[in-house]
Each structure stands twice: as structure tokens, then as C-alpha cells.
Amino acid sequence: MPRTGRRPGEAGTRAAILAAARDAFAARGYDGVSIRQVASVAAVDPALVHHYFGSKVELFRTAVRTAVDPEGLLSDLFAGDVDTLGERMVARFLEVWEGGAGANASALLRTAVTGGPTADLVREAVLPAVAGELLRRLGVDRREASLRAALIASQLSGLATTRYVLALPPMAGASAEWVVAVVGPTIQRYVTGELPRPLPADGGATTP
Amino acid sequence: MPRTGRRPGEAGTRAAILAAARDAFAARGYDGVSIRQVASVAAVDPALVHHYFGSKVELFRTAVRTAVDPEGLLSDLFAGDVDTLGERMVARFLEVWEGGAGANASALLRTAVTGGPTADLVREAVLPAVAGELLRRLGVDRREASLRAALIASQLSGLATTRYVLALPPMAGASAEWVVAVVGPTIQRYVTGELPRPLPADGGATTP
DNA sequence: GTCTATAGGGCGATAGAC
DNA sequence: GTCTATCGCCCTATAGAC
């Protein structure tokens, strides 16, 4: 006998809001999305969004924080052979973007680029994580590790931008295998290849 | 004898609006900027912005369209030796971003990534231009040319994102020479290196 | 050429009834 | 737990006075 009264508890609604928010942020970035839009997609009253999440930034953070676990991904990757790290890294990167976490990652990139509330999240969380692993595995000093991490970030962020965000036909249409085969060596070079000397000074000042 | 009346003609104001708009769009992207803000920075009435430029998108287009001449830059670059194209391309890319056009380019990238009114401008204008030159100079077919152009775009867009937009310390702090030396070979590989076979099927129209 | 005034709308957030 | 009502703000764009 089906109950006919009010929708029971917060079971469905909170999750529905979160899912709608994740998709919306992924598609249009932080600024391009309003709480009212999210509520409308989730078929929910706008006030409920505030009720569950307090504010728009908090909703964004909660929506993005799901399902991306950089720590686990990285330690997994770095456990393997360093000489094949380039291809494995690209392969894993594509898996993440094409799997369930792609929407979150997309939202993060869009928002970071426009200087929204996650610009530093990349600068201060994901990049040092990569640099830290490089530091441990390669036995290089801190400066070199963070340079290599930044180079890796430059190619991978550009890959994500062209393949997923802008969806340029040739990059978006290529198979994962092909992308791994062509971009993998680039990453490998940034991981273990020779770097031009002298290395730039650490942090601080901008371009001479 | 100095005139004392009203500010004469549109001489200063229009240019002031344009400069303010360019800086603002570069710093915060299309959505992050309001006409009122631009007018305020330019010390001008908001209505004047509409008077001169009609609408916000038109202001954006006009502000960005200044000073970037892809055609000239490219034919210049491709006139040289193909085997040194990688490094020369990166060097030129950095010059453009660090010169007067950097603000425009930054605005374009920020806005393209958020799906604003220039997402296709990249897809349909700058990429085909590069692909076209590659086509002419390398004697490869249309599909291969557009693939190589997309690979180049992936590394260069990522470079711009990390160095100028996010300003990750290691990338932002490195000298132009160092960046050219380390990223140049990557681009060179995308220009003349072997590509994994079979090439992906043609994703769509990317050549002139 | 310049500015005031305003139309017309969307926004984030809150208070409080059911 | 859900929704109505609303406050107060900022926005683009236009009409029209000076």
C-alpha cells in the first residue's frame, strides 16, 4: 500500500540537489549557475538548497568534493615503474575525466580558470600533491619536483581543456589509446627527461 | 586659450572605455565583468558604454579584437625552418602573451573556457588557421594537419593557463628562455614527430 | 556627447508559516 | 522537511532631457 502523504525525509531531495548542482556547475561553471536553476532542475524549492547547504559556495564545494580522491589515485600511480609513468598517468587522467568524476573535474577547471572560489584549490592542493610524490620517487630536490609537476600540469590541463571543455573535434574524437600513445611521451619527458639548466629560481618573482 | 566647456568629442572616452574593458575582461572573464564596473573604472557613465558599443558582447568583441593578428604571426613563423618551428612557436607565443596582447588573449581564454560568447571563436578561427599552415608546409593530409594542430593547441593552451591565468608559481616564475627550451621540443614533436597509427577518424571540419 | 531615470528582470539570502 | 513571501541588491538595456 503506497503512502500518499508528503515526500518522506531528506533522502531523495538532498541527493537530487547535489546531482543537479554537479551537472550544472560542470556545464556552465560557478558563475553561470544560479541556485534557482539548480533547484528547478532538481524539482525542488530554492529555499531548500539554502536549507541543506547554507550558501552557494558551500554547495559548490560539496558538489565537487565528491568522488575525486587525488591522494589515492596518485599513490596508486606512483607505485608502478617510473619509466612508464607518463603513459599510465595520461591513461588514468582520461579515465577520471571520462568516468563519473568528469563532471566534477570539469567544474573545477572552469571555475579555477575564471578565478572563482577554487582558483587556489588547484594551486595549493593538487599541484603540491603531485610534486610531493615526484619528490619522494625521483630523489630530486623540492624546486625541481615542483617544476616537473607544473610542466605536467601544463600539458594535462591543456589536454582537458581541448578535449573536454572546448571539445575541439580532433582531440574530442580521438580514442583514449591514441591520446595516451601521443601525449604519454610528453609527460614522460616532463617526469624523467633532462631539464634545461640552469633551473629557474624557486617561487617568488615573475618573468625577467 | 584652453577651452573650459564639456569634454570635447569622443576622443578620450571611447578609448578609455575600451582599455578598461580589456583589462577587466582579462582579469575576470566575460561573466565576471559588468558594464557598470567598466564604466566606473573608465570614469564614465554606464549609458555611454551602450552608446558607443551597443551591447556587452559587442564591447567584449571589440575589446578583444584589437592587436591580435593570427594570420601575420603564423605566416611569419612558418616561413622559417620547420625543424626549429617548435621552439620558435613557443617563443612567439610567450612574446604575444607577455606583450600588449596578453590581456586580450587572457580574456579570450577565460571566456572560451567558461563557454561564453567566444568558445567557437577558438574552435572555428584560430585552430583552422594553424592547421592550414601545417597543411601547406608539411605536405600532410587534412586530417593529420588538424590532429597536429590540436595537439599543439593542447600544450600551448595549458601553458597559458598555468603560466598566466592560474599563475602557478613555478611556471609563472620561470624565464621565457627556460620555458622555450623545455616546452619547445614537445611542440616540435607534435609538428614533425611520428604520430601513433592508425590515426583517429576525422572528427569534423577543422580546416579552411 | 553626456547623463538621469527607469523599465524589467535575476540574483542570494532570510524569516517564518505549515 | 517543505514551501511562500519578501528584502535588498545588481544587472542590461532603453528613453529622453540637457
Image: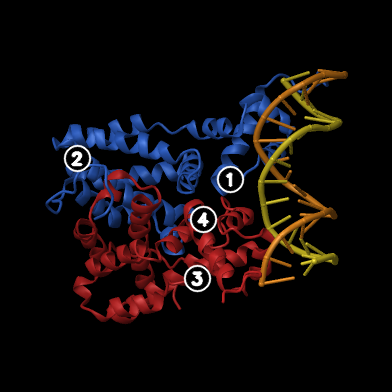
Chain colours: A blue, B red, C orange, D yellow
The answer to whether any part of residue A13 appears in the image is no
Q: Where is residue D3 in the image (x, y as percent from the top left)?
A: 81, 29
Image point 41% across, 41% down: which residue?
A: A96
Front one among A128 and B145 = A128
| Quarter-of-image position of residue B199 | bottom left
Q: Where is residue A194 in the image (x, y as percent from the top left)?
A: 13, 51
> Residue A71 vs residue A23: left or right?
left
Specify the amino acid type for callout 2.
Arg
What residue did someone put label 3 on?
A: B65
Farthest-out residue, front? B1
Establish if B176 lies above or below A83: below
The answer to whether any part of residue A126 appears in the image is yes
Give the alpha-carbon distance from disc 4 to disc 2, as whole Å. Answer: 33 Å
Give the alpha-carbon distance from disc 1 to disc 3, as whole Å. Answer: 24 Å
What residue did someone put label 4 on?
A: B24
- Callout 4 and callout 2 share a chain: no
Establish if B205 lies above or below A179: below
Q: Disc 1 vs disc 3: Cβ atoms closer than 8 Å?
A: no
Mark 3, Cα crowd under 10 Å, few <14 / some 14-19 / many 20+, is some
Image point 38% across, 58% down: which residue?
A: B157
| Camera-side mark, 1 or 4 | 4
Q: Which mark is residue A74?
A: none
Front one among A173 and A166 = A166
- Callout 2 and callout 1 share a chain: yes
> Residue B23 vs residue B133: left or right?
right
